[in-house]
Image: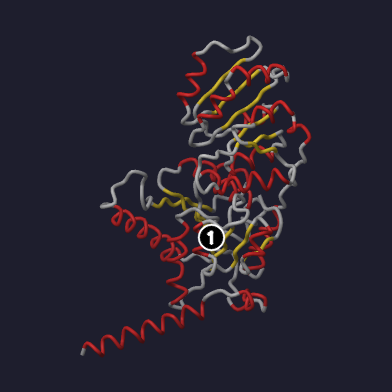
Amino acid sequence: MWLFLLLCVVILFILFIIRLYQILPNRQSRLISKATIHKKSHPFKTCIVLGSGGHTMEMIQLLREVDFNSLYRPRIYVVAQGDHLSSDKIKTFESRKGGKETFLIKVIPRSRNVGQSWLSTPLSVLNSLLACIKIILFDLPDLIICNGPGSCIPVCVISYIPRILGIKWIKLIYIESFARVHTLSLSGKLLLKFVDRFIVQWPYLEQKYPQAEYKGILV
Amino acid sequence: MDKTVFVTVGSTGFDQVISLLTSSPSLQILKSLGYTKLNIQYGKSRESYNEAMKVSNIPNEIQIIGYDYKTSLDQDMSESDLIISHAGSGSILESLRLNKPLIVVINENLMNNHQAELAVELGNKGYLVYSSTSNLLEILKSKAYENLISFPEPDATIFANILNEEMGV
């Protein structure tokens, strides 16, 4: 009986690994144009993860020429609880860009506040995970854009659930911060192998990490 | 017309820089360079700032004002003639985009200071001048920040094209 259960678990685990291997982005297949394999029709529901000050400022620069009116709408901005500055900046940006009101801002609770006791941490991590699940699994965006705040980790992890189950391939676009010249951030290191595009802002990083792409000055 | 130096230490504090820039030697240098106003965003270094304001060594020619935080530093940066900043990427980028002479002070007390990477890289390319607290005054005096190269404008279409390419449009 126990042996049978164990065998099931092992098989499930192996299947999971095989599936993960199948769906992990890799550079060669992209060159053959993975874009056509997972072709979607526009408009694309776009989820954008914002972080504190610097991250949001860079994200706004990145989005300046992105077509909001016919291609990338609606836009769901994910903001950490209490980050009113990012919310305000995005609202100003959206109104300046002059698109129709095709965006909304969703707040996720922080997974750990500064000075919070470690005992209550698992609870708040769960809380913020639930919020991410709600956003990603209920809204099922076509793509997620993130540039490095800690909150993009749970968002990207959860976006793999529909990918593993074959329900939807949510594209993940990661842009490493302008501040990272020679080394990747922790978020960058964790997500490097799991995102569909990994964009860096310094050529040294492209030389060091084969998955990374440097295309010029972005912000 | 004021000639202004704007100092920003970001969301944390940088006591040494605040104390140093408000010290007698520094104010004398600023005076000799023709500066008439010192505007300081001191963040958590309020005590260093208040301490300096108590001592009456401020030359009549220089006006000092300060505050802890503002939602946007854009106006203060735009109105300044020289920016002295901490090594945070946000402040650096904002200053470069405004095309202002920029000195970045690297805080050697921060461990694993990856932010220094950015300041050093941009400094070596001639877009800004970086310094430590120990040679800040010398750099100020040297006016090395007056002959900087403009940081190239970003091309916002690059990212838009990456997205379109990835989405197949």
Q: Residue at x 49, y 40 (%)?
A: A85
Q: Chain of mark 1?
A: A
Please identify the quadrant where the C terminus of chain B is shown: bottom right
In the orientation shown, which residue stands out farthest toward the front? B134
Crowding around mark 1 (Cα neighbors within 10 Å: few <14, some 14 to 19, many 20+) is: many
Viewer-nearest residue: B169 or B62: B62
Residue B10, position in %: x, y?
Answer: 53, 36
Residue A192, position in %: x, y?
Answer: 54, 66
Q: Which residue is mark 1?
A: A188
Q: Is residue B160 above or below residue A4?
A: above
Q: Is residue A171 above or below residue B42?
A: below
In this rendering, position of residue B150 left or right of residue B68 = right
Secondary structure category for the residue under label 1: helix
Viewer-nearest residue: A135 or A158: A158
- Residue B140 position by quadrant: top right
Q: Is residue B24 above or below residue A27?
A: above
Residue A24, position in %: x, y?
Answer: 52, 75
In the orientation shown, which residue stands out farthest toward the left? A1
Residue type at numbered disc 1: Gly
Residue B98, position in %: x, y?
Answer: 69, 36
Q: Residue at x 59, y 13 (%)?
A: B58
In this rendering, position of residue A1 left or right of residue A27 = left
